[in-house]
């Protein structure tokens, strides 16, 4: 069972909360127990799970990544987006979330964020469901 999600980003670097969209795919799949595997098939975008209640948390994460990994720092890669590749390597391109009784088992403060590091672009997220039986 594979589904996909299109994410349209609006800036060069940005975190987009995709929790409700992923839960909607879980609902549509009809899966009650299993694993939801969220995969981003890009080299300059990733996915992470972190606090969604206070938006300043992901702002701080983004600001810190931008501070640690500047846009231009004498990189070799000719496309001039090495910072985007490095941020993606750090954040990662997949997450696995447990599904129980048809619901993603996220903590109270957790949300799933698509991490854009070289936008704005049209992006894709692939979601695979692995049922218990
Ligand atoms: Zn590149």
Image (spheres, rainbow, N blue to C red):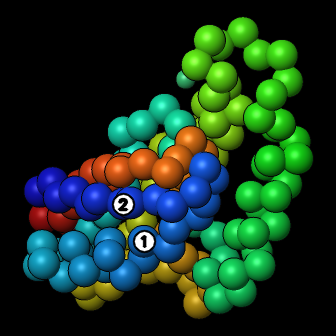
Whether the residue under disc 1 has CB within 8 Å of ligand 1: no
Q: Mark 2 points at which residue?
A: 7
Tell me which numbered mark, 1 or 2, is placed earlier along the sequence: 2
Placement of 91 over or under 113, stated as above or below: above
| Residue 31, image quadrant | bottom left
Single out the mark in the foreground, 1 or 2. 2
Decide if residue 37 is in sight here.
Answer: no
Residue at 77%, 61% (x, y): give it. 61
- Position in image of residue 95 (x %, y %): 46, 55
Which mark is on residue 40? none
Nearer to the camera, 6 or 72:
72
| Residue at disc 2, secondary structure | strand
Decide if residue 62 is in sight here.
Answer: yes
How crowded is the residue under tag 2: few (<14 C-alpha within 10 Å), some, or many (20+)? some
How crowded is the residue under tag 1: few (<14 C-alpha within 10 Å), some, or many (20+)? some
Q: Name the residue under label 1.
A: 18
**Cβ atoms at labels 1 and 2 below 8 Å apart:** yes
Whether the residue under disc 2 has CB within 8 Å of ligand 1: no
| Residue at disc 1, secondary structure | loop
Left or right of 129? Residue 47 is: right
Q: Quadrant of the N terminus?
A: bottom left
Q: Quadrant of ligand 1?
A: top right
Residue at 58%, 19% (x, y): give it. 79
Placement of 71 over or under 80, stated as above or below: below
- Position in image of residue 81 (x %, y %): 63, 28
Residue at 61%, 81% (x, y): give it. 52
């Amino acid at each position: 069972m594979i589904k996909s999600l299109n994410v349209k980003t609006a800036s060069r670097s940005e975190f987009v909360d995709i929790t409700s969209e992923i839960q909607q795919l879980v609902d549509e799949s009809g899966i009650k127990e299993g694993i939801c595997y969220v995969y981003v098939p890009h080299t300059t975008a990733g996915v992470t799970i972190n606090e969604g209640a206070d938006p300043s948390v992901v702002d701080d994460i983004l600001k810190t990544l931008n501070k640690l990994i500047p846009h231009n720092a004498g990189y070799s890669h000719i496309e001039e987006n090495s910072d985007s590749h490095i941020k993606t390597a750090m954040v990662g391109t997949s997450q696995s979330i447990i599904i129980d009784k048809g619901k993603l088992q996220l903590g109270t403060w957790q949300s799933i964020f698509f991490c854009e590091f070289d936008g704005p672009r049209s992006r894709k997220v692939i979601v695979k469901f692995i049922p218990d039986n």
